[in-house]
Image (cartoon, rainbow, N blue to C red):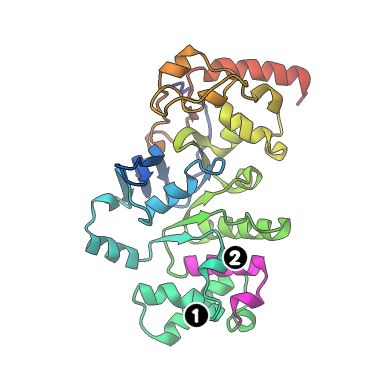
Amino acid sequence: MTTPPVPAKDTSATPAGEPPLLDIVDLSVSFGRARSGATRVLAGAHLAVRAGQIVGIIGETGSGKTTLARATVGLVPADTGRISFAGRELTRLRPRELRSFRRSGELQYMFQDPLRSQDPDLTVRRIVAEPLAAVGTPGRQERAARADEALALVGLDPELFGDRTPGQLSGGQRQRVSLARAVVTRPRLLITDEPVSALDASHRNLVLGLLDRLRRELHLAVVVISHDLGSLAGIADRVVVLYRGRLVEQGPAGEVLEHPRHPYTALLTASAPSVRRGTRLLPADLRAPKDRAPWPDDEGCVFAPRCRFATPECRTEPTTGPVPGHTEDSPHLVACHHAAAWRDRMTRRAGEEVPA
């Protein structure tokens, strides 16, 4: 594994010396039963998020992004690893203690599809107030008032929208209702699953702007799962890249998206030209050779079957994933045997064929 340090400014709102709010170490998740052949969808994942920080998680469909997020909030069980929140190890809590933690409202999850996560028969005000009842906020009037505050916080006038139902709202408005419901308990960490994937450009920018504003006003830490690299480039402090359930690269958002050091990240950024303003890598140069065949997950680099730069070492020697992000905030970490060599080669070719 190559882990060359890169000078980069940590844009986190919390000093680097303080421990992370969310700390995930060596997390693995499998689906299915062992006897019938369990499928591992996440292996050895590390993630650290500080208070007031936005961390983006990117990767293609099936890379394990949503599984990582759902395991964090306990929606799917973890096989191995440790999940700590504000110094409290969630993976060691007993069921009763875990339920008590969930009722605190400090950690919230914003689902991808508002229509499926909002009761069509409830008014917007009741939908937003639901988490308050779950965390034990007394009094219907108090909950309604708090819901109206949350609606106003995301730019929806409670007088106009409070008594409507989800079917009477646009897609962007429904997503803002989901955001209001997620922040009504004033959480310390919000995990959002593809918050802008179904929105047009104007609503996408509006929701992303709200996330950025809320993290500053509420000192809210946010994890954003997204395939929209351009969106993350505008708001994320750090970016984590997943491929087939493994972390292959992580670091400051500008460094990772502008100067990727793993071939897979380069492939992602090459498919999103707006992310890259400097030297661009050509998709053709990253295309996998046709004679590459996959091999078992525990042998060699997980990306090697698709990598044009793979060598025999890549087939036999596993790459160790990037170390936990909280050990050092600024370094740009990558799990690749030949990161420096392929990057130099591609930069020269891109500089000759596609001037910056």
Q: Is 334 rendered above or below residue 160?
A: above
Quarter where residue 203 is shown:
bottom right
127 shown above or below 20? below
First in sequence: mark 1 vs mark 2: 1
Q: Nearer the viewer, residue 9 or 354?
A: 354
Quadrant, the N terminus: top left
Classify mark 1: helix, strand or loop: helix
Residue found at x 24% / y 61%: 95
Q: Using the image as rendered, state which of residue 105 and residue 51 is in the foreground.
A: 105
* Residue 31 % position (x, y): 38, 46
Amino acid beneath label 2:
Gln
Occupied quadrant, residue 58: top right
* Residue 22 at least partly seen: yes
Query: Would you say residue 140 sits in the magenta stretch?
Result: no
Q: Residue at x 38, y 65 (%)?
A: 105
| Residue drawn 33% across the image and 51% down it | 77
Residue position for label 2: 175
Q: Position of residue 147 (x, y in %)?
A: 50, 77
Q: Secondary structure at mark 2?
A: helix
Span shown in magenta = 164-183
Label at residue 126: 1
For label 1, count other residues whose C-alpha is less than 10 Å away and answer few (under 14), some (14-19) or many (20+). many
* Tags 1 and 2 touching, CB below 8 Å: no
Q: Residue furthest top?
A: 312
Q: CA distance from mark 1 to mark 2?
A: 15 Å
